[in-house]
Image (spheres, helix red, strand yellow):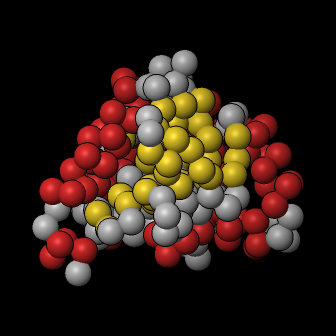
């Protein structure tokens, strides 16, 4: 089974910026990190793949060190994880790796990621073609898009769905759930997309 998520922003710095900004129901980041990993391990086993659509770890002016440890969290997961690069990863590539994507990719593969994709990925679920990307503005017009980046602000757009953790009680979206969402597209009132 394949699963989808985005925007975990794992961190070790307990400034609570992610917790407060996204109304996450955790008392601190240690609890957040532990709970999310526990939820995912209940959902996805060793034969499954998790597509993480970016911002696995935090990297910002308050937290420029956590990534060295939080990317190791992938080792605590039973499933294989394919990371689609998000803006926080792009910041690391730029500021830490001097724009050397291949070196950063090697770092992530050494941490335990199954694969790392920089510019989005085409996949199929059943008869549907999907595009996996971090930012919704990078969507493909002729496909259903799964994206993150905008946290819990908007769940559905005309061209796809936000699969970020803040939209699904920190659970992964399964292939079956994505198929169910696709079936619902014709049922959405057009006002949803305006």
Q: Is residue 71 left or right of residue 48?
A: right
| Residue at image coords 62%, 41% | 82
Residue at coordinates 32% horizontally, 68% vertically from top-left? Answer: 157
Q: Nearer the viewer, residue 66 or 40?
A: 40
Q: Quadrant of residue 148?
A: bottom left
Q: Residue at x 82, y 46 (%)?
A: 106
Q: Position of residue 117 (x, y in %)?
A: 69, 52
Please tell me which residue lies in front, 10 or 109: 109
Position of residue 39 measured from the top left corner of the image (x, y, whole percent) = 35, 32
Residue at the limit of the structure toward the bottom, as seen here: 194
Q: Quadrant of residue 145?
A: bottom left
Asked whether the viewer can see residue 63, the reply is no
- Left or right: 168 with respect to 91? left
Quarter of the image that includes the C terminus: bottom left
Residue at the spot x=70%, y=47% of the render?
Answer: 116
Which image quarter: residue 64?
bottom right
Vertical side of 134 occupied by 37: above or below: above
Residue 184 lies, in percent from the top left, at: 21, 50
Q: Does residue 153 show up?
A: yes
Q: Residue furthest top?
A: 46
Establish if 189 lies above or below 68. below
- In percent of width and height, residue 32 lies at 37, 46
């Amino acid at each position: 089974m394949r699963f989808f998520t985005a925007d975990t922003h794992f961190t070790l710095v307990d400034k609570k910026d992610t917790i407060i900004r996204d109304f996450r129901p955790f008392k601190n980041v240690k609890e957040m990190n532990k709970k999310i990993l526990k939820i995912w391990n209940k959902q996805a086993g060793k034969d499954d793949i998790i597509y993480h659509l970016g911002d696995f770890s935090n990297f910002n002016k308050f937290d420029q060190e956590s990534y060295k440890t939080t990317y190791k969290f992938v080792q605590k997961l039973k499933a294989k994880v394919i990371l689609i690069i998000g803006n926080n990863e792009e910041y690391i590539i730029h500021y830490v790796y001097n724009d050397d994507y291949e070196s950063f990719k090697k770092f992530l593969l050494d941490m335990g990621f199954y694969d790392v994709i920089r510019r989005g990925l085409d996949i199929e679920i059943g008869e549907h073609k999907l595009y996996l990307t971090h930012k919704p503005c990078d969507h493909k017009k002729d496909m259903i898009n799964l994206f993150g980046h905008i946290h819990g602000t908007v769940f559905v757009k005309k061209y796809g769905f936000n699969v970020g953790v803040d939209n699904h009680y920190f659970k992964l979206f399964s292939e079956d759930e994505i198929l169910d969402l696709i079936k619902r597209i014709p049922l959405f009132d057009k006002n949803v997309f305006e």
